[in-house]
Image: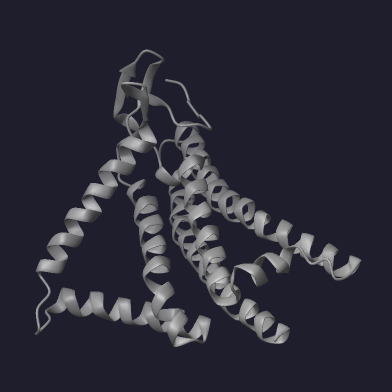
Amino acid sequence: MHLNISLSPETLFHIGSLAISNSFFWLMVVSVFLLVGTFFLNRAIKMRPGKIQNIVEMLLAGAYEFVETTVGDKKVARRAFPLVFTMFFFILFANLMTFIPGQAAVTIKTAEGVVPLFRAIIADYGLVFMMTMLSVLITQIVAIYVAGPFKYIGRFLNFTSPLNFFLGLMDLIGEVAKIMSLSFRLFGNIFAGEVLGAVMLFLFPFFLPLPFAFLGLLTAIVQAFVFAVLTLVFISMAATVTEIEAESVK
């Protein structure tokens, strides 16, 4: 028995020139499960809700109130809530699925050797990077919509004075830095928790890994919340700060 830790996901098989990794395979399984679950949940909605529907509605209402309180603008909250809540729920669900017992024991033999069939989705930086790009891109779209394309570009390329030009470049660097900070925070914490749990389970198979498993569970919940809230804050700042800047120019 040996401990196999890989920063990148392992390839299971190929469909033509497309390599199917274990994290991508797990992503497809989780996505299909969520789509099917959402379909049946939507069909089960009734005018007189039962216990499960009451719980779901209470959770959604509480989440929306949190978003509205954080943003402070009902119009922005209504538009941002579907994206932010979807990101939170997807990351949370994907993280919790890694705690299903026995996943590490399910392996498949490939040309590269025996590799695990399942891998934590959020421990694949490629997926995390694309989610972060989506978050930052939507933030920029909001900023352009509020201020207009010319004022948006002028925020970063301001030639009225050397100081304003320098501050504009700093703003541009800050927007790019959002990609790194968001993606590395989520990926780093989830991947580190996965590695720590695997090492402790390898060294001490019984009892001792339990506290680390609870720590990993807490990290899975917190990181999903942090990613969603930071996305919400970025969107809120883009909507409010850019609007203030646009009014000041007038």
- Residue 218 in picture, x, y percent from top left: 47, 59
- Residue 61 in picture, x, y percent from top left: 32, 82
Residue, far right: 162
> Which of the pair 168/119 is nearer the observer?
168
> Which of the pair 171/204 is nearer the observer?
171
Q: Establish if 30 lies above or below 103.
A: below
On screen, residue 161 versus residue 212, left or right, reads right
Query: How many numbered circles are shown?
Result: 0
- Residue 159 in picture, x, y percent from top left: 83, 66
Quarter of the picture containing the N terminus is: top left
> Which of the pair 112/98 is nearer the observer?
112
The residue lying at 59 percent from left, 53 percent from top is 185
Quarter of the picture containing the C terminus is: bottom right
> Which of the pair 46/105 is nearer the observer?
46
Q: Establish if 50 lies above or below 41.
A: below
Residue, far top: 111
One can see residue 208 in this view: no
Q: Establish if 229 lies above or below 23.
A: below
Q: Would you identify the image quadrant in which residue 68 lies?
A: bottom left
The residue lying at 36 percent from left, 37 percent from top is 24
One can see residue 217 in this view: yes
Q: Would you identify the image quadrant in which residue 175 lies?
A: bottom right
The residue lying at 22 percent from left, 48 percent from top is 32
Colour basis: one colour
The residue lying at 9 percent from left, 78 percent from top is 46
- Residue 166 in picture, x, y percent from top left: 85, 63
